[in-house]
Image: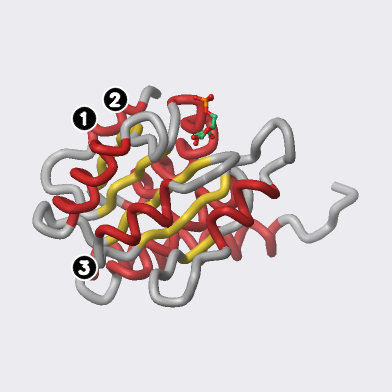
Amino acid sequence: MSPAQSSASASPAPLVGIVMGSRSDWETMQHAAAKLEALGVPHEVRVVSAHRTPDVLFQYAESAAGRGLRAIVAGAGGAAHLPGMLASKTAVPVLGVPVQSKALNGMDSLLSIVQMPAGIPVATFAIGNAGAANAALFAAALLAPEYPAIGAALSAFRARQTDEVLANDDPRQ
Ligand code: RP5
């Protein structure tokens, strides 16, 4: 599934924006899109680069609240400025996903995203696929009080997850 296909299937009225610094981040960020899709959370997916398309970044952040976005899941790798720059231009909560970089295994991404100065918060998740998935689950949790169907889908997901562990609790089998 490409970012464009995921975006098309999410219409109308996205509540969550998934953005990433490069198409190469999609391998990681598709795990966020898959979780939102599974929970029935309307979302959109875009490539927005802090370094290569800074004007698009500003436009995206400045229009986010007005377009109804309630959270932005932002993934980037290396000198990962995207989540912090988005957060500096919008009050919509930004959930940062450090993409696992080739050179430094994502430690550069993690530190770039997590070490925000006081005043502009970015909620930072784990490096890589787990972080992408958890950022989506967190966005769903933010929406759950206002959207009962999302809350119910989230509860069902967690119950299934628990049941799967309980049903397979002998690692030798
Ligand atoms: C960052 O640079 C992107 O978020 C990506 O993780 C990294 C490498 O980008 P590409 O060179 O693969 O486009 O801005």
Up the image or down, 74 lies above or below 104; here it is below
Label 3 vs 1, first from the N-terminus: 1
Q: Amino acid at mark 1?
A: Ala
**Residue 35 location (% of width, % of height):** 43, 48
Q: Amino acid at mark 2?
A: Gln
Q: Nearer the viewer, residue 154 or 61?
A: 61
Q: Amino acid at mark 3?
A: Tyr
Up the image or down, 92 lies above or below 109; here it is below
Residue that protrudes farthest toward the right in the picture: 172
Q: Nearer the viewer, residue 10 or 163?
A: 10
Q: Quick check: 90 left or right of 122?
A: left
Up the image or down, 134 lies above or below 146; here it is above
Residue 70 found in image quarter: bottom left
Q: Quick one: label 1, few (<14), some, or many (20+) residues within 10 Å?
A: few
Q: Nearer the viewer, mark 3 or mark 1?
A: 1
Give the residue at x 44% y 25%: 23
Residues at marks 2 and 1 touching, judged by CB atoms closer than 8 Å = yes
Name the residue beneath numbered marker 3. Answer: 147
Spatial CA distance of label 3 from label 1 is: 22 Å
Q: Quick one: label 3, few (<14), some, or many (20+) residues within 10 Å?
A: few
Give the residue at x 36% y 41%: 19
Q: Nearer the viewer, mark 3 or mark 2?
A: 2
Name the residue beneath numbered marker 2. Answer: 5
Name the residue beneath numbered marker 1. Answer: 8
